[in-house]
Amino acid sequence: MILFDTERYIVRRFTMADEQDFFLINGHPEVMKFIRPVKSKEACAIFLTENIQLYHDDSIIGRYMVIEKKSSLLVGTFSFLFLSDNLNYHIGFGLLPAFWGQGIAQELVQKGITYFFENVSKDELFAITDPANKASKKVLLKTGFLSSKNKLEKERLLDLFVIRKEVA
């Protein structure tokens, strides 16, 4: 199922047939540098199954595959997940290094913001980044997020960003 698309990309649910692509992202040290520890192929298979189970309640919660329309190449991932409070949503993305610096993250986040506020009855959407992840901070600020404060998330101190519905 397609969550949304942009001019150049499709954002869709992962399936079990995407196990190798899921590993390419979650097993990649550069992609995971600011996100989470790299996972083995076996751990990725389990993580993919857990992620697919998130789709069953038809909410937007989950990690999604990003594919380039013209080539059908895997570009990365996009997500809507809960913050640790399970009340507030955050947006996320991770791109394979070959696709860095091309405006893709900004395109995905901008469309993701619109999709979120059109489909979820919340007035705020959050984003979290590692304090050292300057590229992600730049994307968030360019797409209208405002720096909020630091947040302790799963024992990691992260920078918290927020965008409000009336601004988006």
Image (cartoon, grey):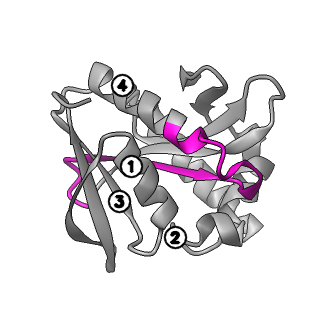
Q: Which of the marked residues, 1 or 3, is nearer the chain's N terminus?
A: 3
Relative to 28, residue 112 above or below:
above
For badge 2, the amino acid type reads: Phe
Q: Between marks 1 and 3, how big is the CA–CA gap? A: 9 Å
Q: Which of the marked residues, 4 or 3, is nearer the chain's N terminus?
A: 4
Circle 4 Cα neighbour tier, 10 Å, few/some/many (<14 / 14–19 / ≥20): few
Q: Are marks 4 and 3 in contact (CB under 8 Å)?
A: no
Magenta region includes residue 88? yes
Q: Secondary structure at mark 3?
A: strand
Front-lying residue, 154 or 125: 125
Residue 49: mark in rendering: none
Circle 3 Cα neighbour tier, 10 Å, few/some/many (<14 / 14–19 / ≥20): many
Which numbered mark, 4 or 1, is in the foreground of this view? Answer: 1
Residue 128: mark in rendering: 3
Which numbered mark, 1 or 3, is in the foreground of this view? Answer: 1
On screen, residue 112 versus residue 145, left or right, reads right
Measured as percent of width and height from the top left, residue 145 is found at 29, 46
Q: Between marks 4 and 1, how big is the CA–CA gap? A: 14 Å
Q: Quadrant of the N terminus?
A: top right
Q: Between marks 3 and 2, how big is the CA–CA gap? A: 10 Å
- Which quarter of the picture shows residue 109? top left
Q: Secondary structure at mark 4?
A: helix
Measured as percent of width and height from the top left, residue 105 is found at 55, 43
Q: Which of the marked residues, 2 or 1, is nearer the chain's N terminus?
A: 2
User: What is the span of residues highlighted in magenta in the rendered image?
Assistant: 84-106
Residue appearing at x 20%, y 31% in the figure:
167
- Which quarter of the picture shows residue 29? bottom right
Residue beneath label 1, please? 140
Residue appearing at x 19%, y 26% in the figure:
121
Residue beneath label 4, please? 114
For badge 4, the amino acid type reads: Thr
Residue 14, can we see it?
no
